[in-house]
Amino acid sequence: MISAREHGERLLRLENVGVSYRRRGGLNRRSLFWALEDVSFEIYRGETLGVIGRNGVGKSTLLRLLAGIIQPDLGTIRFDYPCHISLLSLQVGFIPQLTGRENAVLSGMLLGMRRKEIEERMGEIIAFAELEDFIDQPISTYSTGMRARLGFSVAFQADPDILLVDEVLGVGDAEFREKSAQAMRQKIRSNRTVVLVSHNQQTIRNLCDRALWIEKGCTRLESDPDSVLKAYSGSLKPA
């Protein structure tokens, strides 16, 4: 796999970024918890960067930071170009009383799409979600699987400069999970810029140009996937 670092334009760089939260301690005292402490890396146009690490090391916080949902308490995020960044999040803005069609429009707009664009793609959204007979029914009548299918179908239509994916390579029932996972893999491989958080090492190895290992809120290693996964796997083995 050709490195985007060698052939692509740099879109942004994180420099020594930290994010903290207030948490309640004993006797009603509040203490500071650092979800991220010192993270630095770059993102290049057309690459897929895989992020790996144990649970609770700050991977999801990192995606929220890149999406602009939260701001860093330390360090800087420097943009080389203006970027539209979208977090692939299912069922964004769903309202039970509205129909599937109305929720698709609302959710797509919250993901940064224009209403006209969503309406033009509505046929694809409905067909992919396999909801032709239910799209004009209130979403409160949908099963959990039906809502997940609609949410994925809408989110999949978003086409930002940088797509953030948090372990969403398959949703719904078994058949739809395979269908959505395959569609997501094709999207990732189509020269889009993607940041992918996953616990699945094979997914990182197969889909990513580079990998970033985060440990205790800090950048532990950033390199090609094989090198990072080898080091990460070694850290998981008992001494």
Image (cartoon, rainbow, N blue to C red):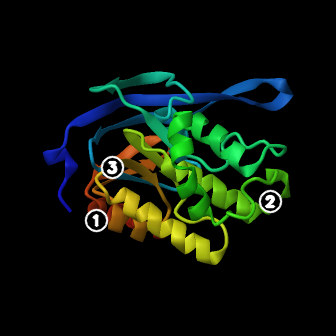
Q: Is residue 229 left or right of residue 217?
A: left
Q: In percent of the image, x 50 and y 34: which residue is there?
A: 67
The x, y position of residue 171, in whole percent, is 62, 64
Residue 189 showing in the rendered view: yes
Q: Is residue 219 left or right of residue 59?
A: left
Per the image, label 1 sits on a secondary structure element best described as helix
Q: Earlier in the sequence, mark 1 or mark 3?
A: 3
Give how far apart the Cα atoms at labels 1 and 3 are: 21 Å
Q: Earlier in the sequence, mark 2 or mark 1?
A: 2
Q: Looking at the image, is 214 positioned above or below residue 42?
A: below
Per the image, label 3 sits on a secondary structure element best described as loop
Residue annotated with mark 3:
192
The x, y position of residue 148, in whole percent, is 67, 59
> Label 2 is placed on what type of residue?
Tyr
Residue annotated with mark 2:
142
Q: In percent of the image, x 65 and y 46: which residue is there?
A: 104
Residue annotated with mark 1:
226
Give how far apart the Cα atoms at labels 2 and 1 are: 42 Å
Q: Tag 3: Cα neighbours inside 10 Å, few (<14), some, or many (≥20)? A: some
Quarter of the image with the C terminus in it? bottom left
Q: Quadrant of residue 142?
A: bottom right
Quarter of the image with the N terminus in it? bottom left
Per the image, label 2 sits on a secondary structure element best described as loop
Q: In percent of the image, x 39 and y 23: which residue is there?
A: 76
Q: Earlier in the sequence, mark 2 or mark 3?
A: 2
Give how far apart the Cα atoms at labels 2 and 3 are: 32 Å
